[in-house]
Image (cartoon, helix red, strand yellow):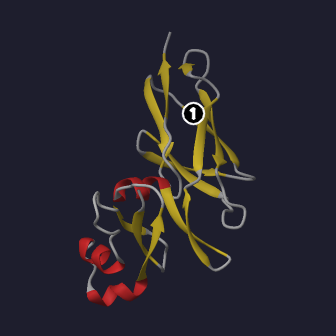
């Protein structure tokens, strides 16, 4: 079932997404989406809507999709995915405390995407990773035992997390 997505034309941010109701009711129109999203009247001129041919709610649309302009046309596309990998699944701190985190960006659009830096996080502490040709690496020094969760901070990408356990023998 299709959904209608309300977005801001200035930054292409998805504001609201509503699926077609079951039964004979039509797909929500622009005005109904604006009312549902509680958009002030003076802000409507900056908004537009587009139909996406899958049933989604707002949070799912914001996490998985993006609005792009390609050759003057507005399109809904899936967000690029960051594949996070580690040089090791577990880290024995008595042998080594350096860990290499690598990222590969998949599902990019040649006409739109050119990533030079992305923001990752380790246990909610952000750090940058430089990217070239959709690949980047960062060496991390870990000095304390525990679980370390690496994830994506940057909302331009779909989420992906890995967990590394560090321990002393």
**Which residue occupies the extreme top position in the image?**
169
Percent coordinates x, y for residue 163 in the rendering? 48, 29
For the N terminus, give its image quadrant.
bottom left
Residue occupying image coordinates x 31% and y 73%: 33
Q: From the viewer's perspective, is residue 16 above or below residue 54? A: below
Q: Residue at x 49, y 72 (%)?
A: 12
Mark 1 surroundings: few (<14), some (14-19) or many (≥20) residues within 10 A: few
Q: Position of residue 159 (x, y in %)?
A: 48, 46
Q: Is residue 6 left or right of residue 168?
A: left
Q: Which residue is mark 1?
A: 141
With 53 as the anchor, is 23 left or right in this view? left
Q: Is residue 81 above or below residue 23?
A: above
Question: Considering only vertical position in the picture, is 30 above or below 95?
Answer: below
Give 71 or 91, whichever is nearer the viewer. Answer: 71
Q: Position of residue 133 (x, y in %)?
A: 75, 52
- Most extreme residue toward the front is 24
The residue closer to the viewer here, 129 or 67, is 67
- Please tell me which residue is depicted at 25% across the width and 77% down the height of the picture: 35
Q: Nearer the viewer, residue 50 or 107?
A: 50
Choose top left, top right, bottom left or bottom right for residue 7.
Answer: bottom left
Say which element carries label 1: strand
Residue located farthest toward the right when viewing the structure as drawn:
133
Task: Tally the marks.
Answer: 1
């Amino acid at each position: 079932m299709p959904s209608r997505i309300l977005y801001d034309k200035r930054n292409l941010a998805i504001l609201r997404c509503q699926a077609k109701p079951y039964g004979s009711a039509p797909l929500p129109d622009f005005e109904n989406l604006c009312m549902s999203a509680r958009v002030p009247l003076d802000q409507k001129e900056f908004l537009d809507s587009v139909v996406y041919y899958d049933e989604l709610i707002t949070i799912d649309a914001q996490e998985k999709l993006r609005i792009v302009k390609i050759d003057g046309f507005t399109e809904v596309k899936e967000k690029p995915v960051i594949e996070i990998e580690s040089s090791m699944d577990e880290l024995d701190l008595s042998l080594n405390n350096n860990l290499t985190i690598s990222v590969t960006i998949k599902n990019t659009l040649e006409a739109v995407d050119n990533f030079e830096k992305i923001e990752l996080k380790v246990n909610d502490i952000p750090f940058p990773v430089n990217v070239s040709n959709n690949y980047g690496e960062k060496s991390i020094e870990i000095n304390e035992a525990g679980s370390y969760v690496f994830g994506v901070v940057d909302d331009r990408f779909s989420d992906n997390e890995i967990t590394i356990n560090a321990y002393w023998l």
